[in-house]
Amino acid sequence: MENIQLFVPTYRIDETLAEIRECLQIGWTGLGFKTDKFEKAWVEFTGLRHAHFINSATAGLHLAVELLGEQGGWKPGDEIITTPITFVSTNHAILYAGFTPVFADIDESLNISPGSIEQLITDRTRAVMFVGMGGNPHHLRAVMQICRNRNLKLILDAAHMAGARIGGFHVGIEADVTVFSFQAVKNLPTGDSGMACFADAALDTEARKRSWLGINKNTFQRTAQLGSYRWEYDVETVGYKYNGSSIMAAIGLVALRYLDQDNAYRRQIAAWYDELLAPMGGNVTPVQHDPGSSRHLYQVFAKERDALMVTMNAAGVYPGVHYKDNRMYRMYERPDADQSSTRKLSEQLVSLPMHLRLSYADVQRVVSSIFAFYARKE
Ligand SMILES: *Cc1c(COP(=O)(O)O)cnc(C)c1O
């Protein structure tokens, strides 16, 4: 029997190659052309005000923190309340810009709890960084309210949230900046790329310069405007090489056409898992998602997690963990983290295989491997 992997990206190959072929034919693979098209398509799809295509969500989060900090006059060491249960990019972005991550607690939704945020606000708090774990928007609106009431910026790390909605509206309107990831194993896969969506027009403009080394006009615009390549430009700041490419945008444009359909299938897989795991009682508890979740992940709390994962591997099933408490990494170590409720939750976390190639029979096989483990123990 074939192994069942945690993630396998699915591409519509012929359609994607046709989109890439256009880039190769006209001889334009870089910034502009398909990146402009993808940005427009993303704005139309999400209803967000702006979308800037970049080479990763990590880059976008860096730009988000840096530009909000500049606009708000934040000082080095000012605080951003964030989650310890995330991919390290989220918290690295805070450090890149010279600010201090302050770790809130998560609850059973795996998102930071509004109550925990309230307790951590000081006169140095400038923003909240919210991660919608596995695509789950739970608590996002409540956190937006806290940010409004306390005059804090809200940065949404929406790396798992392409196509996630609240009450029919795409997530992101709540935040000052929303950053999506289109990395290869996210739910809108390209190779590596992302989208930084600033609510403020001036910050969107600034982000476009900052992600192109501080240059004040992109090459494609200059070419398009003047009908021939114009070499002259100005450089305003020390920017970065963070722009996305037309090849990645070409892949993303096709993936976007199928995103709602694909997320619906993810929710179907989640419903199968929910149903088949229901008899597990207290050994395995699925994380509940709000209805608009993109279902990038299907996570459970499992007793004896590490031993369970070894048994599943022996059956050819490869689950994962999202994520280890970041405070278990040397550079984010915090003295009081070991006793936290967050640590206890994170130590039980397992992500079950979740991707578009899974059939109902595959889901049954994953669940059987879990049943086998707990049955053996009794
Ligand atoms: C993947 C991920 C990122 C980083 O995305 P890249 O596009 O790979 O830089 C950031 N935050 C979270 C929660 C992620 O899962």
Image (spheres, rainbow, N blue to C red):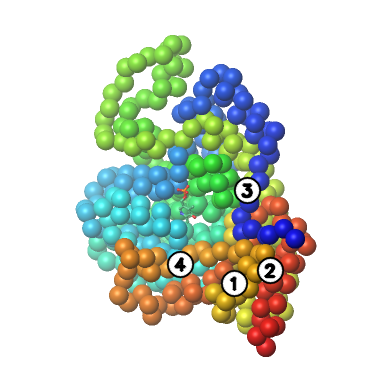
Q: Which residue is mark 2?
A: 315
Image quadrant holding the C terminus, namely: bottom right
Q: Which element is circle 1 on?
A: helix
For disc 2, the neighbor class at 10 Å (few under 14, some 14 to 19, many from 20) is some
Q: Which residue is mark 3?
A: 9
Q: Which residue is mark 1?
A: 310
Residue with the most extreme left position: 75
For disc 4, the neighbor class at 10 Å (few under 14, some 14 to 19, many from 20) is some
> What residue appears at the point 45 percent right and 39 percent down from the top-left corner?
55
> What residue appears at the point 35 percent right and 62 percent down from the top-left corner?
81
Between the residue at mark 3 and the residue at mark 2, the CA separation in whole angstroms equals 22 Å
Between the residue at mark 1 and the residue at mark 2, the CA separation in whole angstroms equals 9 Å
Mark 3 / mark 2, whichever is N-terminal:
3
Residue 124: x %, y % from top left: 25, 61
Q: Is residue 151 above or below residue 196?
A: below
| Residue type pointed to by label 1 | Val
Residue 324 is labelled as: 4
Q: Nearer the viewer, mark 3 or mark 2?
A: 2
Mark 2 / mark 4, whichever is N-terminal:
2
Mark 4 / mark 3, whichever is N-terminal:
3
**Which residue is at the front of the view, 313 or 54?**
313
Between the residue at mark 4 and the residue at mark 3, the CA separation in whole angstroms equals 23 Å
For disc 3, the neighbor class at 10 Å (few under 14, some 14 to 19, many from 20) is some
Mark 4: C-beta under 8 Å from nearest atom of ligand 1? no
Residue 176: x %, y % from top left: 41, 49
Residue with the most extreme right position: 361
